[in-house]
Image (tube, rainbow, N blue to C red):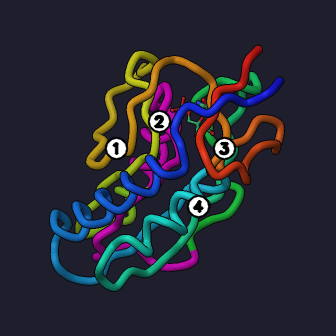
Amino acid sequence: MQPRSLISAQDIAARVAVLGREIAARLPDGALTVVGVLRGAFVFMADLVRAIPRDVRCDFLGVRSYGAATETSGVVQITSDLSLPVAGQHVLLVEDIVDTGLTLRYLLDLLQAQGPASLHVCTLLSKPSRRRVEVPLDFVGFEIPDRFVVGYGLDVDQKYRSLPYVAVVDE
Ligand code: 5GP
């Protein structure tokens, strides 16, 4: 399995810069808590928070979804909880990829129950053709076709997370 580049490091950097400015402009004034979904979103989040020209607090949610290796079952286990309270905070949830939408639906319900002042979603990648539940995506880096991708934080069996670009793995 040799990964082939789908989105270059340069294209990702340019898009992240635009997203950062859009997020700063569109989210309500006040303290902003950025919550990254581990582990896939850690690379994207590191670049994204540095592109948002305002003060941010950073927190993380560790999740594991059961199912086949390349597809979620929608049953999500929280492996590491938030360390900061989000009640009354403006929250931006940062995802690596939204596929069926089941994981994000679960996480949005979980966060909403804690009473944030506002809740927005930014995902690096979205596969709209795979969606099984409607989820609000406020900021999307790239829409991609129904291909399994790795790199820039995304893995297959813990490999390829450190690739600086997004790639397709040939079966
Ligand atoms: P969803 O619940 O939207 O179906 O899936 C979300 C999760 O499935 C992502 O956070 C990611 O962990 C995994 N996933 C979905 N599509 C891909 C993909 O193309 N590549 C990788 N590496 N993970 C994916």
**At which x and y percent is residue 148?**
63, 24
Ligand 1 closer than 8 Å to the CB at disc 3?
Answer: no
Is label 3 or label 1 in front? 3
Q: Secondary structure at mark 3?
A: loop
Residue that numbered label 2 is attached to? 98
Q: Earlier in the sequence, mark 3 or mark 1?
A: 1
Instruction: Report whether 19 appears left or right of 44.
Output: left
Q: Is residue 128 above or below residue 120?
A: above
Judge by depth and name the residue closer to the eye, 91 or 97: 97
Q: Earlier in the sequence, mark 2 or mark 1?
A: 2
Mark 1 → mark 4, Cα distance in angstroms: 20 Å
- Identified at 76% across, 43% down, the residue is 160
Would residue 4 be visible to someone looking at this image? Answer: yes
Q: Which mark is residue 94?
A: none
- Identified at 83% across, 37% down, the residue is 157
Judge by depth and name the residue closer to the eye, 165 or 26: 165
Q: Earlier in the sequence, mark 1 or mark 4?
A: 4
Is label 4 or label 2 in front? 2
Residue that numbered label 4 is attached to? 61
Q: Which mark is residue 140?
A: 1
Instruction: Report whether 39 appears left or right of 146.
Output: right
Quadrant of the frame with the N terminus: top right
In the image, what residue type sits under mark 1? Val
Is label 2 or label 3 in front? 3
Ligand 1 closer than 8 Å to the CB at disc 2?
Answer: yes
In the image, what residue type sits under mark 4? Leu
Quadrant of the frame with the C terminus: top right
Count of numbered circles in the view: 4
Judge by depth and name the residue closer to the eye, 2 or 58: 2
Q: Earlier in the sequence, mark 4 or mark 2?
A: 4
**At which x and y percent is residue 104?**
46, 41
